[in-house]
Amino acid sequence: MNWEAKSIDTIIEQKEYIDSALIPLILIEGTPEGMKQSASAAEFLMNLTPFIEKQFKGRIVQFPPFSYTPESDKGRLSAEWKSELDKTGFKHYIFLTTDRSWSESGELPEAVHIPSIPLEHMDKQVKQSVLQDQLRQLIPLLSKRWNEL
């Protein structure tokens, strides 16, 4: 399911089954060298998250991406996100990011780091194959988290 008005009633009604929030974290860098890298990483995540949502439809709600900069206070951001997301009643939060610093800092234990793969020069079939491979790598991690509660 997607975080959109037409889906909210279903999400609320099916809360016992739709128990996971998938939130992409997008790093926005303004330096010339950082812009290309952060744009490529954002493109990768914005292609991967709907792919994950489609595979786990009825279990996961794909939230809009959260964007932040290298100067953002990650501790404050993670506290704000958790506080607001706790109100939704989801049992599981999966913050998907290409930024290794989230998992290294420990400020957001729900963060799942996945290395970015540049997609801009891939044709549709190769891109689909790459996304399927990434999903295969994420399934054991998601299953482990779902089994923890």
Image (spheres, rainbow, N blue to C red):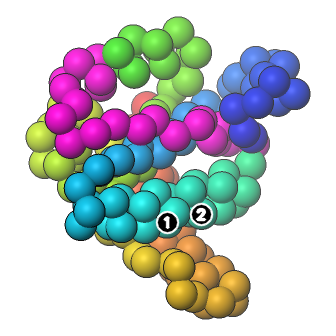
Q: Residue furthest left?
A: 105
x and y, in percent, of residue 145 in the image: 41, 44
* Residue at 51 percent of width and 63 percent of height: 43
**Residue matched to label 2:** 47
Q: Is residue 60 left or right of residue 81?
A: right
Residue 145 visible to the viewer: no
Q: Amino acid at mark 2?
A: Asn
**Residue matched to label 1:** 44
Q: Amino acid at mark 1?
A: Phe
Counting the numbered discs, the total is 2
Helix, strand, or loop for circle 1?
helix
Q: Quadrant of the C terminus?
A: top left
Helix, strand, or loop for circle 2?
helix
Task: Assess whether residue 71 is covered by the magenta stretch.
Answer: yes
**Pointers 2 and 1 in contact (CB under 8 A)?**
yes
* Magenta span: 58-79
**Vertical order, 71 against 38 (above or below):** above
* Residue at 51 percent of width and 78 percent of height: 119
x and y, in percent, of residue 49 in the image: 58, 55
